[in-house]
Amino acid sequence: MEPGIREFFRRIVSSISLLLLWMIINVTLGIKLNYAFFETKVRWYNIAFYIWLMASLVALIWLCLKIWQKPIEDLHD
């Protein structure tokens, strides 16, 4: 396989893996541990979960942009 195609697929797999890891962590914290739901009132762990959710989303987007920012060499049309 050509090096440019290998690099392209590596970036795709890295992006999908990061997204799936982010989703698994946040679904576990939010739904399984009930941090995403407000029961009777807003509690500190609800606020902490949503702050974590937004901060980790920003970090995920930043990492994906960093992965895809560098041009792929040896990739010809």
Image: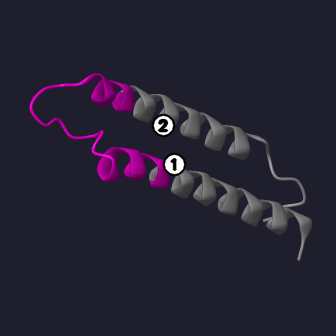
Disc 1 packing (10 Å; few <14; some 14–19; many ≥20): some
Q: Is residue 57 magenta?
A: no
| Image quadrant assignment for residue 77 | bottom right
Residue at 65% over, 39% down: 63
* Amino acid at pointer 2: Leu
Which element type, helix, strand or loop, lies under badge 2?
Answer: helix
1, above or below 44, in the image: below
2, above or below 70, in the image: below
Cα distance, mark 2 to mark 1? 8 Å
Which element type, helix, strand or loop, lies under badge 1?
Answer: helix
Observer-nearest residue: 4 or 56? 56
Q: Quadrant of the N terminus?
A: bottom right
Residue at 30% over, 39% down: 35
In this figure, which residue is indicated by the disc labeled 1? 22
Where is residue 66? Give x, y as percent.
70, 38
Which of discs 2 and 1 lies nearer the camera? The answer is 1
In this figure, which residue is indicated by the disc labeled 2? 57
